Amino acid sequence: MGFRRAVALAVGIFFFASGLPKVVPLQPLHNKMVSEFKAFNRVFPLKHFGVKLEADVYRTLIGVLEIAMGVLMAFGRSDAAWFSTVGLLTIMVGAAYTLIALEKQTMEIAIPVGFGCVLFWLLFGDRY
């Protein structure tokens, strides 16, 4: 297994693990996700395009997507891993936007930006 594949495996497992408490009531993380997504819903990135979701639907949707795409990235074929990486990168851009709109601390914003950079590297790193 090469370095790039090992990073994809680790990042995929991370996203699987981070999606679980958004969907499954694993306490106390689930309660934290419920309260955070109520705040996230106020600055939902797609509101500008007329898309409105309830906070619970938003949380569940992101959780399911993170679980599915994390598994595909970690264990899927290369084409499935590529599409899941694009999807997760999109989620990280939305997460960074949300945290900036909520005026969170720089360290909190750095997490999705950092994972976004790793995902970008997984997608395009061999081309530069």
Image (cartoon, rainbow, N blue to C red):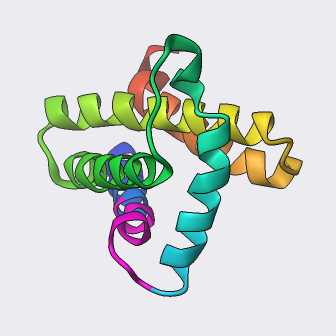
In the image, residue 34 sits, relative to residue 128, either above or below, namely below
Front residue (pair 42, 96): 42
Look at the magenta stretch and give its main secondary structure.
Answer: helix
- Say if residue 3 shows up in the picture: no
Residue 57: give x, y in percent of width and height.
Answer: 38, 49
Q: Residue furthest left?
A: 77
Residue 56 coordinates in the image, percent (x, y): 43, 55
Q: Is residue 83 left or right of residue 16?
A: left
Instruction: Between residue 111 and residue 43, name the one nearer to us.
Output: 43
Rendered position, 113 above or below 50: below
Q: Residue at x 38, y 80 (%)?
A: 25
50 in the magenta segment = no
Q: Please state if 108 lies on the left or on the right of 74 as rendered.
A: right
Query: Bounds of the magenta span?
Result: 16-26
Q: Residue at x 48, y 36 (%)?
A: 91
Residue 110 vs residue 29: left or right? right
